[in-house]
Image: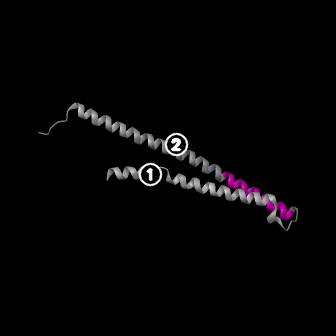
Amino acid sequence: MAKQKPVTKIWSDLTQWLEEASRVVGKEAGDLTLKGRLKLEIFDLNRMLKETFTALGTAVYDEVFVKKNDNWRQTAKVMAAIRKIKSTQRKLSAKEKEYKKVGKEAKRKATRKKS
């Protein structure tokens, strides 16, 4: 006949398991919250990028076809739009990398514990 664990040992194992499970759930909830915030920031950066490209197109059209300016590349509006596009693209790239990282570290730690 198999030896039974005392009730106190079973209770101790159960509470330990519950504590560990609540830590994991808390971490996952935090990761989901962070991912949601990052997704929103990525969406906003994409929106800003589209608006800036539109402003760039408008500025180029205005300089080339309305004002007949041959030196349109050097105008303040065009240069400002290009700087803003480059800056927004860098921010977007950083946010996308951060988004991909969220949760990966926790998964690696969980995989190591199982081994």
Residue 60 magenta: yes
Is residue 110 placed above or below 77 in the rendered structure? above
Q: Earlier in the sequence, mark 1 or mark 2?
A: 2
Q: Residue furthest bottom?
A: 70
Q: Which residue is mark 2?
A: 33
Residue at 64%, 51% (x, y): give it.
Answer: 45
Amino acid, disc 1:
Glu
Q: How many marks?
A: 2
Classify residue 86 as left or right of residue 94: right
| Structural crowding at the residue carrying mark 2, measured as other residues with C-alpha within 10 Å and reported as few (<14), some (14–19) or many (≥20) | few
Q: Residue furthest top?
A: 8
Classify residue 30 as left or right of residue 114: right
Disc number placed over residue 105 in the picture, else none = 1
Is residue 115 placed above or below 64 in the rendered structure? above
Residue at 84%, 60% (x, y): give it.
Answer: 62
Badge 2 marks a residue whose secondary structure is: helix
Where is residue 58 drawn, in percent x and y?
A: 79, 58
Residue at 38%, 49% (x, y): give it.
Answer: 110
Residue range (magenta): 47-65
